[in-house]
């Protein structure tokens, strides 16, 4: 009965999303202000029904209702309750419903915060979000119903949740990642509303979009960071990024999101690149749909893709095609109001930011091409090919190195035009310093063999030096603490985000260059050595968990013959005897010790294969990601404080600008 109630709530949510999409837009013909005002309560109502439907899905999981096909395929009676809750988004049907729930939450947040916007803009934005929600809910009802019954002979038990998903990260990673994905619907819908209403993308509106785009990017960055960390400790390979198609599906909108945020900054400060900014807001959302299609359609194979169905993917493909066609037609036929107001020279911050925009877009395109190229070859009947890390590294790393150079220039240069010889001289000095650093590292550490590492050292040094120099230039004119405090939070956020990018690059460079690894077979009481560490295999025992059994190993670790710690890698066996590696990690700021337990190599199970790794500075990768997030949060806080001090979205002002 709960499943049927949930389905009814889902149908009602679909009807409300249709009303959200239709009623506000009828104002175009009727000019009825009451119909415009109905957009907000409709959005609130839709969230109530879709939230209740999602609650019903959680309830049928917790009650072990295996007559529901989705529950039977993704749960079991022995599954802990917290994993039963996360199992609601562990498959195709539930993940799409989570997508729709998060979209509804974003819509309500926008409706709640849009009081200072002209009602025409806010209502049109809510209506477009309603149409997006309606499309997703229609896909769920007609191809991915999570409440479908398995009658008249339901199974007595479930097939269990995929063992790889029985992890704490599964509870937080997908909701956070989806929040970032879906959040780009706000800039998309708002840009569409601006074009439909023929508003100018002025600085006031740009600030509004920028806050939503930055918030979405924060969640997407956090989701990618968590996913990288999850893959590192869960899969047993010891890597943090594999250029997997599903990883690429989230990375592409992340790159476009970075471009969008920087383009919004230019439009806000200089009133230029308006059309380009709107186009980027379209692409950021479009590629989140592309990512959803790749993950949930079954067209690509991925270790991360746990819910796939090519037939269902066709619905997503149709939705993607409609979104692309409608948004681009709107962009083409409604461009009249968004012309650039000012000019700038080639030697300016605008040029450097625009260059980085293009480089990031090119990077996104080459990653997309590498991801879908095997699909194109197979569709043309030319056989099958595999595109892996060598391709992605060969095309992406050079682009990022060049991006780093323009990034540093963009930090130091001023808006519009730079005539100061002082800045040029400072750039020349830090360029020489960075060149010296990279040559020293290339000679003493990389042995003249690792050219990419030498270039990366220059790029990283350049970014850090430019950030430090810009801060120095900023502070030298501030003669008091009060003056220093007057510097906007957004400035410190920018510097923190760019330093975070550099720190992540340091982590990537260090872990890819200096990490050590060793695959070894050990019996109990045997010892092996790696670097300055010794690893003694001391014990193997059988243990039983809530819904699994495990081979639980103990390995004593010594650093320069001095006892350091004991690590416990596991090999777990879940329902249907599926083996899962549970790594043991001794974390540190400068290095991680990483042990993954393999298979027994002798009939008496006394000899086991182990993968032992020393991962140099790998946590700097995630530290850099967190610093980028912190910088983006400071940027949002800065604009929020500014909004409190000045009425930046006065309706009368916007009507005059229209």
Image (tube, rainbow, N blue to C red):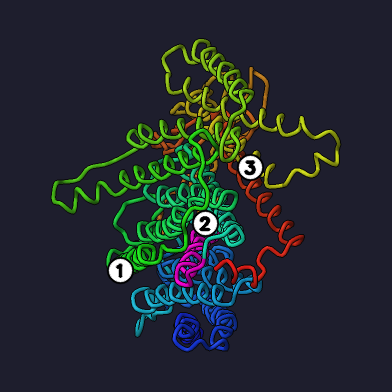
Q: Can residue 550 be seen in this view?
A: no
The extreme left residue here reads 381
Which of these two is toward me, 315 or 270?
Answer: 270
The residue mark sitting in front, 1 or 3, is 3
The residue mark sitting in front, 1 or 2, is 1
Which is nearer the N-term, disc 1 or disc 2? 2
Residue underneath mark 2:
177
Residue at position x 70%, y 33% from top? 471
Which is nearer the N-term, disc 3 or disc 2? 2
Residue underneath mark 3:
494
Distance from Cα at disc 1 to Cα at disc 2 = 23 Å
Residue underneath mark 1:
318
Residue at position x 84%, y 33% from top? 479
Give left or right: position of 460 versus 564.
Answer: left
Q: Which region of the structure is painted magenta? A: 175-199
Which is nearer the N-term, disc 1 or disc 3? 1
Magenta span includes 289: no
Say which element carries label 1: helix
């Amino acid at each position: 009965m709960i499943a049927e109630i949930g389905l009814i709530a889902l149908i009602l949510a679909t009807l409300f999303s249709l009303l959200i999409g239709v009623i506000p837009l009828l104002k175009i013909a009727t000019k009825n202000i009451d119909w415009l005002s109905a957009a907000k309560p409709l959005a609130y109502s839709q969230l109530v029904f879709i939230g209740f439907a999602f609650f019903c899905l959680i309830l049928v999981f917790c009650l072990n209702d295996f007559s529901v096909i989705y529950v039977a395929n993704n749960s079991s009676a022995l599954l802990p309750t917290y994993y039963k809750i996360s199992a609601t988004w562990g498959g195709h049907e539930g993940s799409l419903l989570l997508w729709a729930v998060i979209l509804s939450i974003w819509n309500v947040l926008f409706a709640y915060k849009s009081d200072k916007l002209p009602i025409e803009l806010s209502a049109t934005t809510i209506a477009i979000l309603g149409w997006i929600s309606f499309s997703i809910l229609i896909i769920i009802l007609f191809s991915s119903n999570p409440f479908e019954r398995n009658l008249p002979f339901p199974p007595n038990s479930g097939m269990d949740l995929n063992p790889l998903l029985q992890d704490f990260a599964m509870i937080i990673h997908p909701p956070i990642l989806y929040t970032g994905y879906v959040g780009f619907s706000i800039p998309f819908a708002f840009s569409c509303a601006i074009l439909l209403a023929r508003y100018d993308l002025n600085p006031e509106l740009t600030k509004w979009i920028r806050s939503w785009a930055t918030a979405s990017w924060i969640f997407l960055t956090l989701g990618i960071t968590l996913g990288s960390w999850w893959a590192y400790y869960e899969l047993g390979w010891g890597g943090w990024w594999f250029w997997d198609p599903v990883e690429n599906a989230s990375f592409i909108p992340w790159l476009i999101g970075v471009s969008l945020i920087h383009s919004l900054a230019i439009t806000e400060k200089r009133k230029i690149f308006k059309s380009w900014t709107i186009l980027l807001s379209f692409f950021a959302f479009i590629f989140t749909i592309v990512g959803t299609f790749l993950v949930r359609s079954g067209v690509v194979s991925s270790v991360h893709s746990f819910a796939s169905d090519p037939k269902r993917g066709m619905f997503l493909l149709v939705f993607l095609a409609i979104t692309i066609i409608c948004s681009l037609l709107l962009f083409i036929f409604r461009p009249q109001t968004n012309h650039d107001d000012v000019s700038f020279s080639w030697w300016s911050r605008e040029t450097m930011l625009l260059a980085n925009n293009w480089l990031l877009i090119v990077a996104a395109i080459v990653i997309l091409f590498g991801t879908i190229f095997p699909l194109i070859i197979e569709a043309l009947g030319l056989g099958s090919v595999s595109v892996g890390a060598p391709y992605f590294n060969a095309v992406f790393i050079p682009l990022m190195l060049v991006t780093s150079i323009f990034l540093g220039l963009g930090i130091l240069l001023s808006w519009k035009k730079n005539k100061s010889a002082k800045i040029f001289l400072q750039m020349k000095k830090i360029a020489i310093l960075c060149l010296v650093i990279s040559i020293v590292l290339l000679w003493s550490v990389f042995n003249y063999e690792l050219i990419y590492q030498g270039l990366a050292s220059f790029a990283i040094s350049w970014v850090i030096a430019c950030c430090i120099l810009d801060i120095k230039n900023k502070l030298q004119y501030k003669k008091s603490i009060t003056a220093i405090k007057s510097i906007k939070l957004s400035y410190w956020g920018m510097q923190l985000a760019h330093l975070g990018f550099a720190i992540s690059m340091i982590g990537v460079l260090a872990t890819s260059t200096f990490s050590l690894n060793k695959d070894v077979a050990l019996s109990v009481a045997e010892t092996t050595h790696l670097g300055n560490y010794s690893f003694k295999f001391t014990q193997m025992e059988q243990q039983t968990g809530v819904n699994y059994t495990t081979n639980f190993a103990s390995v004593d670790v010594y650093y320069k013959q001095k006892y350091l710690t004991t690590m416990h890698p596991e090999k777990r066996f879940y329902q249907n005897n599926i083996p899962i590696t549970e790594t043991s990690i001794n974390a540190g700021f400068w290095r991680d010790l990483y042990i993954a337990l393999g298979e027994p190599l002798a009939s008496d199970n006394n000899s086991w294969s182990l993968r032992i790794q020393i991962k140099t500075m790998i946590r700097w990768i995630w530290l850099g990601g967190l610093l980028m997030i912190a910088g983006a949060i400071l940027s949002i806080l800065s604009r929020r404080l500014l909004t409190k001090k000045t009425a930046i979205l006065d309706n009368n002002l916007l009507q005059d600008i229209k």
